[in-house]
Amino acid sequence: ATDPLRVLVTGAAGQIGYALVPMIARGAMLGPDQPVILHMLDIEPAAESLKGVKMELVDAAFPLLKGVVATTDVVEACKDVNIAVMVGGFPRKEGMERKDVMSKNVSIYKAQASALEKHAAADCKVLVVANPANTNALILKEFAPSIPDKNITCLTRLDHNRALGQISERLNVQVSDVKNVIIWGNHSSTQYPDVNHATVTANGAQKPVRELIGDDNWLNNEFIATVQQRGAAIIKARKLSSALSAASSACDHIHDWVVGTPKDTWVSMGVYSDGSYGVQAGLIYSFPVTCEKGDWTIVQNLKIDEFSRDKMDKTAQELVEEKALAKSCLD
Ligand code: NAX
């Protein structure tokens, strides 16, 4: 029998956490044959609620779930974890300055980085979901120097999946037949959803999305804005931010990272930039990646036109500013 893997979810009593933990326990993240032990962390005010989530996990009698740790102690939470999904953070409240929100998250991610560094399994893979996701991941990387750069990522798969969904709706094709969209940059409204290399498979043949849609104006304007603003549209409709789609995309992110991406298919992940595509090295930036045997690789040599270049640079610039702001919170 396979040994269980330990999966940490921080902010587990929150709305994404509540959607995510049953998905993990059902095998949506690590596959139907991989037993898991869930580690759930939240803060003291949410301790009772977290207990309730644990009770429900017990009640659901998931065959793959071999144990549940529910705690407000970050050290206990991080002990021997193989996968860490960082959903907990400090939300921006009305009237708060960007710097105040950043400062709260910098201190959270600094502390959690140290705990992961000391107590997680040596090959622990980290996915940061909490906003500002790219910059939180960067802080975590800075304060967990023994965790390899390659093991620290942030979630832009939700944006990637949203782009697939929009194309599938517009063309009235199955979402599973659309692939190779790209989310470049920050998980924020400056992200650049790029369809220049995306294809749709129909009757065994692959056709470029741009050709099938045949409306550059829609692709260059409305499509991009819809994907960039989708989070806000969900809040408007639900009076709550995206949760099931965020949880599902977090499972996709880890699943493809661990299990591998299908042939000729890439996905978007926020990863540590090595300078590929002229993106400043040392930022956590969303790139197209393929995964094999637990490692991601940035897809190289895609042709970048001027329109794309401009948008890729703008979102990089925002990340440079966030990095500076985060740094100023440390001083
Ligand atoms: P909730 O407010 O429902 O849940 C957050 C949970 O985190 C709460 O239970 C809170 O008590 C806990 N928490 C706060 N500080 C903590 C700490 N220091 N340690 C452990 N837990 C802590 O928010 P939810 O809707 O679940 O969203 C969670 C995060 O995901 C937010 O930062 C949100 O902005 C971000 N998102 C990121 C997305 C992405 O694609 N990268 C999309 C969805 C989502 O908006």
Image (spheres, helix red, strand yellow):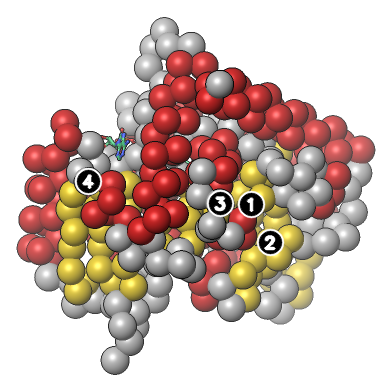
Q: Can you identify the residue that label 3 sits on?
A: 145
The amino acid pointed to by label 2 is: Val
User: Which of the two marks, 4 or 3, is nearer to us in this view?
Assistant: 3
Asked if the residue at tag 2 contacts the one at tag 4, i.e. Cβ–Cβ closer than 8 Å, the answer is: no
Q: Where is residue 144 in the image (x, y as percent from the top left)?
A: 50, 49
Residue at screen point 66% across, 50% down: 272
Q: How far separated are the C-alphas under marks 4 and 2?
A: 34 Å
Q: Are marks 2 and 1 in contact (CB under 8 Å)?
A: yes
N-terminal-most mark, 4 or 3: 4
- Secondary structure type for disc 4: loop
Instruction: Using residue 304 as the reference point, say whether residue 165 is left or right of it.
Output: left
Cα distance between the residues tagged 2 and 1: 9 Å
Find out whether the residues at labels 4 and 1 contact each other: C-beta distance under 8 Å: no
Q: Nearest the camera: 310 or 86?
A: 86
Label whose residue precedes the other's in the sequence (2 or 3):
3
Work out whether mark 4 precedes mark 1 in sequence or the reverse, and give the earlier one.
4
What residue did someone put label 2 on?
A: 289
Q: Which of marks 2 and 1 is in front?
A: 1
Mark 4 crowdedness (10 Å alpha carbons): few <14, some 14-19, many ≥20: few
Q: In which quarter of the image is residue 192?
A: top right
Amino acid at the residue labelled 1: Val
Residue occupying image coordinates x 58% and y 60%: 148
Residue position marked by numbered label 4 in the rendering: 73
